[in-house]
Image (cartoon, rainbow, N blue to C red):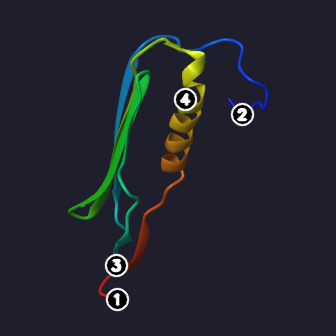
Amino acid sequence: MEKKEARKYPGEFEGPRKDTDRIEIPLPEGYEVDELPPPVDVDYPFGSYQSRTAVQGKSIVYTRVFEIKKVSVPLDLTEELKRFYCVIGGDERSTAVLKPAGK
């Protein structure tokens, strides 16, 4: 996707799919959340991606949904496909910030 020359063929996926993840991370003793990553919600004709990070009790809960709706992505949507993967990559690299409790 990062090549400088224009694509000659549409993007192809193996098939439609929908993946859902829920990850629960216990907070270390003596720490609380200072910052959480912002939610993400993108929707294109070929796919969508949503993620949320929240504090539930003494845990950080990260949920995300990745969906491929169409097998083929036409050439005129190549830039949107690149943006789609950039958003996902940015979300996957985002972090929560913790601080000592009570400070």
Q: Nearer the viewer, mark 2 or mark 1?
A: 2
Residue 60 location (% of width, % of height): 32, 58
Label 3: state its secondary structure.
loop
Q: Nearer the viewer, mark 4 or mark 3?
A: 4
- Reading the image, the residue beneath label 1 is 103
Label 2: state its secondary structure.
loop
Q: Earlier in the sequence, mark 4 or mark 3?
A: 3
Numbered label tally: 4
**Residue type at numbered disc 2:** Glu
Residue 13 location (% of width, % of height): 53, 15
**Residue type at numbered disc 4:** Leu
Q: Which mark is residue 23?
A: none
Q: Are marks 1 and 3 in contact (CB under 8 Å)?
A: no
- Reading the image, the residue beneath label 2 is 2
Q: Earlier in the sequence, mark 2 or mark 1?
A: 2
Q: Which mark is residue 81?
A: 4
Image quarter where the N terminus lies is: top right
Q: Is residue 57 left or right of residue 66?
A: left
Q: Which mark is residue 30?
A: 3
Q: CA distance from mark 1 to mark 4?
A: 43 Å
Circle 2 crowding by C-alpha within 10 Å: few under 14, some 14–19, many from 20: few
Name the residue furthest front. 76
Q: Earlier in the sequence, mark 3 or mark 2?
A: 2
